[in-house]
Image (cartoon, grey):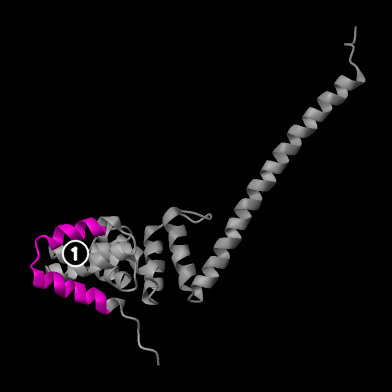
Amino acid sequence: MQYKQCSLNSILQSYKISVMKHLVYALTFILLTTTAFADAINITQLRHDADLGNARAQVDLAHAYHDGAGGLKQDDAAAVEWFKKAAAQGDLEGEYNLGIAYYRGIGVTKDINEAVKWFHKSAEQGDAEAQYIVAAAYQNGVGGMPKDLVQSDYWLSLAETQGNRDAGRERILIESSMTEAQVAQAKKLVDEHSKPLPKP
């Protein structure tokens, strides 16, 4: 029987490659389990903060449920419940996302009136996208809003001020179908909205 001739260097090289492969596998396993553990800890902390009434944590937890992130099972109904808790505290993102949920029927029964109610609350706090949606509701008389071009123009102006270009284009179109008095009335509403509050 003949043995294959191997040099010490080739044996060591083969051994190094084997050790390196095992090391890479071990590090990959550690990284993946550490990441999963870190996600679980973050979700645990997030849930704790959300349970204590932290609106930001409630919104983040709602997004985690919606996306199925951090080891959570994707659950739109749970997401809506957390958005509701944040919205009940006046959180603008919670209100806006609750509007989206009702508008699209995600995790709740589709309800345009309820959607517009939450978009309106978010718009009142300055959310440009919600302002644009509220303007459309007034323009078309949907979601429990009366058809009111003055209000539509007002909300479009506020959204445009915050950089919503679509609102600017839509405002120009609406104003072309409004009377001069209606345009002046909408401008007056915007001016009143823009005034700084008196100092105490």
Percent x, y of residue 53: 48, 76
Tell me where the magenta segment starts and ends, as one range. Answer: 167-192
Which sits in the foreground, 156 or 17? Answer: 156
- The part of the image, by quadrant, that contains residue 11 is top right
Please name the residue shown 13% across and 65% down the image.
Answer: 141
Residue 128: tell me if it is visible.
yes
**Amino acid on which the number 1 mark rests in the picture:** Ala
Q: In this view, does 34 lie to the left or right of 182?
A: right
Dot 1 lies on which element?
helix
Please name the residue shown 46% across and 68% down the image.
Answer: 58
Percent x, y of residue 150: 15, 70
Quadrant in which the C terminus is drawn: bottom left
- The part of the image, by quadrant, that contains residue 191 is bottom left
Which sits in the foreground, 99 or 120? Answer: 120
Vertical arrangement, residue 200 with respect to residue 158, above or below: below
Please name the residue shown 25% across and 79% down the image.
Answer: 192
45 magenta-colored: no
Percent x, y of residue 51: 50, 73
Percent x, y of residue 114: 24, 68
What residue is pinned by disc 1?
137
